[in-house]
Image (spheres, rainbow, N blue to C red):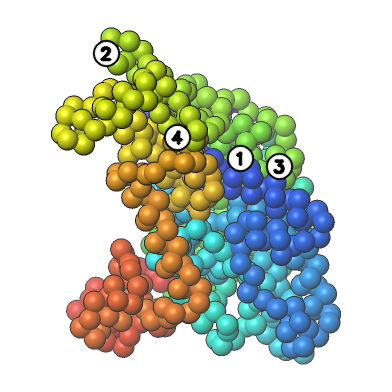
Amino acid sequence: MAAHFANEIPSRLLMWQRVRAYAVPPSMIETAAARRAVGDWAGACAAARVDVDLDLRAVRRRHGTSLTASLRADLRRLAPDLLRWHMPRIAPDGRLRPGLTVSLARYDLGSGAAPVRLVVRTPPMRADAGQRMALALWEGSGENESGHHPHPYPDRRFRLDLHRHLWDAGRSGELAARCGADRGDGSGGSGGASPGAVLGWSVGLDSSWAVDGWAAEAEVLLRAEGRSRGAFTVRLGARELAVFELVAPDDSHVPTVRALREGLPPQEVAALPVLPEAAARVLPDLELLRAGLVPVERLHPLVAAALPAGGGVSTVHGSGPGSVPGAGPDGSSGDPHRVECRGEVHRIALRNGVLTAVDHDPAQLRREELLVALGGPPLPCLRAIDTVHRSPEALPAVRDRLLHGDVAGALAVVEGLLGPAAVLRDGPLRDELETAAVRRIDHGLFRSGLLPVHPAAGAAGGGDASDQGRTSHRPRLDRRTPHTIRQKLNGRTRPRTGLAR
């Protein structure tokens, strides 16, 4: 049956609905798929705005032909558009989680050497213009070619090496089994009880947690750690880390998950394996399908092919399938270019690449524009054209496309409204385009390593932090934080809170 919400649609689903509408446009999917089909994995990465920070020749010289062959095979199977589709994101706008290093594949070297990992990195928030990602090889040491990245080590909570179906085009068909879509309604046999009650956990968990699949996913996690049973942790919130254990009477029984009965010291809890976010949460696409917010046709082709037809669900009352509030398929809503002018309905349309009032004589328009320049009242048609140039109805769609790095899509919407020969006037639309262009310079400086200093370094020397890089948020404490800032944040007068992640 369809998911019905008592009050309103959860904000996380509205976020994912906009992410699915703007973050991975169809043009990116088509171009990346075409290049991947002919074996051009580097071209597919370029189409999906993924930078490649690895050299196969250098990898062969350093690690040999065996590892290079495995790496090349994974790169050919990589679907960078599918990877972008499933990357972790942050509320409220659904941008890529900044400053993250996600492990995609692991290559064991043997003889006690640290494994080599294929990773994808996201830039920090101050340099996330364009929402670009970067492929790299992490060799398990502190010295790496991405030394200016705030978190170069692979994150334990956000990892995809145990979920290859989220980026490997050859294994995308495993999605239904891994996300629980083949269980129909996704209840997992809980009988209507809360997920927390099923696990013996005192804190209630909402429907976004895939509790019914934790046992199978925990078995995969522990097997990767070299164990068959044992304890693991699940991060339930910013300050909440729950400890569970995978138990079974013997190997012939299906293992189950239950809350750990005895408490553990914080040091031991921090050393336990962490259930990846991709396994702990319900697949957002499955939630959107069950809520009727996105039709199957609007999903990524590999995701739509893997999930059951229609997901076995119907739509939510009052919400049209795949509808994005305030935006049509081309970023506009109907035909806005009809204006009541001097008691008549006049048309405003594109002529010779410029938006103009077609029901007025060109000589009359020139006279009216001159009167406006001298301070006279403009015609309703000219006033409507000026409004479209400064703050059109499609501005939210343009803003969302720019936010997710789809500059070409945003310019296509602008050209469809104003024409390719239009000159932008001062206003919100021009401000958004100029801001997007300026922030791309910040990303270029970050990529080139010209901004390796932490944004808080300016405060340490009494200078302005904007000289080192623009930031609109409180800088995080990391290895590159200046000593004076670290000493201040770690002072005894500063209250200590919760468990560190």
Mark 2 to mark 4: distance in Å?
23 Å
Which residue is located at x 62 percent, y 83 percent?
140
User: Looking at the image, is 77 positioned above or below residue 186?
Assistant: below
Query: Looking at the picture, how far across and down is residue 2, in whole percent?
Result: 57, 27
Q: Residues within 10 Å of mark 4 (few under 14, many from 20)?
A: some
The C terminus: image quadrant:
bottom left
What residue is pinned by disc 3?
301
Nearer to us: label 4 or label 3: 4
Q: Residues within 10 Å of mark 2 (few under 14, many from 20)?
A: few
Which residue is located at x 32 percent, y 39 percent?
390
Query: Looking at the picture, how far across and down is residue 105, in whole percent?
Result: 70, 69
Which residue is located at x 77 percent, y 61 percent?
40
Is residue 179 or residue 91 the one in the foreground?
91
Query: Looking at the picture, how far across and down is residue 382, in whole percent?
Result: 30, 28
Nearer to us: label 1 or label 4: 4
Instruction: Classify mark 3: helix, strand or loop.
Output: helix
Mark 4 to mark 3: distance in Å?
37 Å
Q: Is residue 453 visible?
A: yes
Instruction: Classify mark 1: helix, strand or loop.
Output: helix
Left or right of residue 72: residue 141: left
Question: In the rendered structure, which amino acid carries the disc numbered 4?
Answer: Val
Mark 1 to mark 2: distance in Å?
52 Å
Numbered mark located on residue 354 in the image: 4
Question: In the rendered structure, which amino acid carries the disc numbered 1?
Answer: Leu
Q: Residues within 10 Å of mark 1 (few under 14, many from 20)?
A: many
Disc 1 or 2, which lies upstream in sequence? 1
Disc 2 or 4, which lies upstream in sequence? 2
Numbered mark located on residue 286 in the image: 1
The quarter of the displayed image where residue 265 is located: bottom left
Is residue 128 or residue 418 the one in the foreground?
418
The N terminus: image quadrant:
top right
Numbered mark located on residue 259 in the image: none
